[in-house]
Image (tube, rainbow, N blue to C red):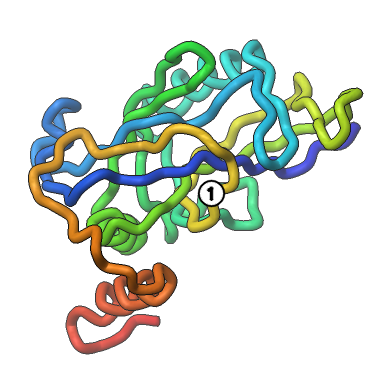
Amino acid sequence: MSKQMLVDYMPFRPIGSLTESSGAAYGIPGGFVVQGILQRSGAKNQNGRVYPRTILERECRRYEQDYISQHRALGELDHPESSVVNLNNVSHNILKIWWDGDDLKGAVQILETPSGNILKALFKAGITLGISSRGLGSVKELRSEGTVEVQEDFELICWDFVSNPSTQGAFMKPLSMHESVDKTNKTNKYFKVNNIITSILCDDGKCRI
């Protein structure tokens, strides 16, 4: 079986508006950190894939050793068609991962990069995003129709933030929140996203699109 790019999603919904103090618990004064479920093992997701616990545990150990411990567990805003993390589009860094039952949870620092600032603004606007794994591997079809199992050759690349969450599950949330959110705003979310991105890219009067 040949390897293919495997991407899978968890929905991500911040609760309330955010402050810049959430990173204090991780020794990042003034930093912005969110935490929640990154991935789930042993359960069929909406892409029809099942990730065995043993395979995810192995890849998490490798990821902690090769990336998190070296403070380079970077991810992008939206998935590229690549197995390499593009530094031009980096938005966040994974600080810590841990297991809670079959749920893999993590703490994620949002960086002060162009993509990170867009991501932070989307959170503050109450936009629903997703956290999505990116990896290389093969799959095997199971007897259950429409279900495939990720195989031993799976290699985790990173987790990205995306606009299209497709797997049901828990939502990530900021570590600390002190402001209220206007939940009566029914403006189309895509219009809001476009306005947020445009305001960030054009904040000095010169658009960089």
- Going by the numbered disc 1, the residue's amino acid type is Pro
Image vertical order of residue 113 relative to residue 4, above or below:
below
Q: Residue furthest bottom?
A: 205
Viewer-proximal residue among 165 and 25: 165
Give residue 195's position: percent from left, percent from top. Answer: 32, 77
Camera-side residue of 30 and 183: 183
Residue 150 percent coordinates (x, y): 75, 27
- Looking at the image, residue 57 sits to the left or right of residue 31; the answer is right
State which quadrant residue 56 falls in. Answer: top right
- Of residue 56 and residue 14, the one placed in the foreground of this image is 14
- Tag 1: Cα neighbours inside 10 Å, few (<14), some, or many (≥20)? some
Whole-percent x, y for residue 60 in the image: 52, 20
Above or below — where is 183 with respect to 75?
A: below
Please report the residue visible at 60 percent of the width from the left and 14 percent of the height from the top. 58
Residue under pointer 1: 165
- Which quadrant of the rendered structure holds the C terminus? bottom left
Residue at (46, 18) in percent of width and height: 65
Q: Residue at x 42, y 41 (%)?
A: 74
Please tell me which residue is depicted at 26% across the width and 44% down the height of the picture.
15
Q: Is residue 120 left or right of residue 7?
A: left
Residue 179 screen position, x and y as percent = 9, 50
Secondary structure category for the residue under label 1:
loop
Where does the N terminus fall, quadrant-wise? Answer: top right
Residue 118 vs residue 101, the one in the foreground:
101
**View extreme (front): residue:** 184
Place residue 156 in its image quadrant. Answer: top right
Residue 27's image quarter?
top left
* Above or below, 116 relative to 167: below
Number of marks in picture: 1
Q: Is residue 26 left or right of residue 93?
A: left
